[in-house]
Amino acid sequence: MLQRNTEELVRRLAVALRGIDLYSPTHPLVQRGIDALSATVLDALREAPSIVIGLIGDEIVVDAVRLPRGTATLIGFARDLREREIEKITFTQGLTREEIRSFVTFLGDREARIPLADRLTTRGVRHIALGKIVVEDVTDDQVGIAAARRVYTTAVETAESLWQAAQAGDQPDTGAARKIIDGLARMVTQDRTSLMALTTLKKYDNYTFTHMVNVSALAMAQARALNIEGTLLREFGFAALMHDIGKVHTPLEVLNKPDKLTTEEFEIMKRHVVDGAHILRRTPEMPALAPIVAFEHHLKQDLSGYPEKIGNRRLNLCTMIVSVADVFDALRSNRPYRQGLATTRIRAIMGEQGNPAFNQVLLKRFVNLMGLFPVGNLVRLSTEELGVVTAEHPTDPFRPQVKIIVDAEGETLEEPLLANTWERDSRGEHPRAVIEAVDPESVGIDPLKYM
């Protein structure tokens, strides 16, 4: 949009908000304001799939164009948005005057206890979305576990908003998704170790959203190891992030059922691959790779799995990478109905001879990439000490570097001890060896504090 058009749109919206604050929804001045706003927005949507209006500090931004500061209209509009705790408004194609009327009317009801976004959904407003501005970024000098944690936390929060938008029937915000993919891609390139450590967290209270981010990070790490970079690396991450979006239509009692699914329930579960592809195809500015991966990610190398009866095709490379990351993260994560599995057990399951689920070359590369005891894992040593894996041995996955934090008597060390389990003592023996991974929640330890 041209700047004069964006200013006109914001002015019309500001007038409509001011009118609904002063008069009843049926007042002629309010109706004229809604008509003028509708004409401006609908005209703009003929040229663009969506229009995003955001509040950053005291500045109004429309589709990445910052409007001039200081005019009374913009100052009042920014104040109105802030008072209503709105940071971002997205209008998408398909918008109707009736949806705009409902939106403006709801904005005027400041006494309502139900959140505005929920009221819009209940009223059937599908082409106006409210959200938060995501400003997290990673610069070249931001590395380490603290920077990775900031990027990861923001990514999980954004994944939740993408999921909720799709669940409400809205289109996921591709701009917000690209922002977090850019951050994850930089971390994968600059500090993969810290980001991979964060993906080892096993909490299940927000499993859906951490799983989205984990699969994206793991897929990009695999892609980067194949020398994929730049735009294509980000498209791999984007497709991985959105691979399960079709599950927004799957009932929770099916998704979280602890027992084996019945035939009918499994048929319901299988629909998510087609639902996901449909959602992503309808979303403006969605990379073409994303619906392909959503559709294919439960197909095996011999095209068994689901969806069924799809004819002859070659699975996309991104699909095969995402399938590995998806299953690996699902098996190691705690769920309400089971504990996550140890890496050694997961390797045995995924690497089972003759298993057609994975491309064996990609699976082997992934296993080498992650190591037997991935960085960030809490492990028990042969000495009964507990330590956090801080580095992998370049050739021997059984002997990582660890930071010992609990001694053999179970006492927490004031000063953690760094130990290379590959080093031998004066008799040529290894004094320490990693025995098993330990669930950090079971012992009340946050391994990331020690990295």
Image (cartoon, helix red, strand yellow):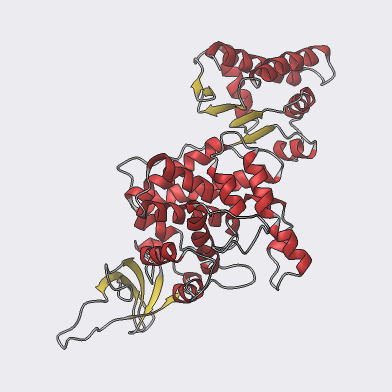
Between 250 and 86, the one nearer to me in the picture: 250
Residue 215 spot, x, y in % from top left: 50, 56
Foreground of the two, 199 or 45: 45
The extreme bottom residue here reads 427
The answer to whether residue 128 shows anywhere in this view is yes
Q: Is residue 427 left or right of residue 79?
A: left
Looking at the image, residue 84 lies above or below residue 156 = above
Number of marks in the rendered image: 0
Left or right of residue 39, residue 173 in this image: left
User: Which quadrant is the C terminus positioned in?
Assistant: bottom left
| Quadrant of the image occupied by residue 198 | bottom left
Q: Looking at the figure, which quarter contains the N terminus?
A: top right
Image: 179 above or below 201: above
Where on the picture, by quarter, is residue 436?
A: bottom left
Kindly tell me whether residue 154 is visible in this rendering.
Answer: no
Residue sticking out furthest to the right: 26
> Where is residue 306 shown, x and y percent of the image?
65, 60
Apparent side of residue 300 relative to residue 370 in the rendered image (left or right): right
Height in image: 71 above or below 161?
Answer: above
Residue farthest left in this picture: 426
From the top left corner, tell me how far across and down residue 77 is, in percent: 61, 20
Q: Position of residue 427 (x, y in %)?
A: 16, 88
Above or below: residue 301 compared with residue 149: below
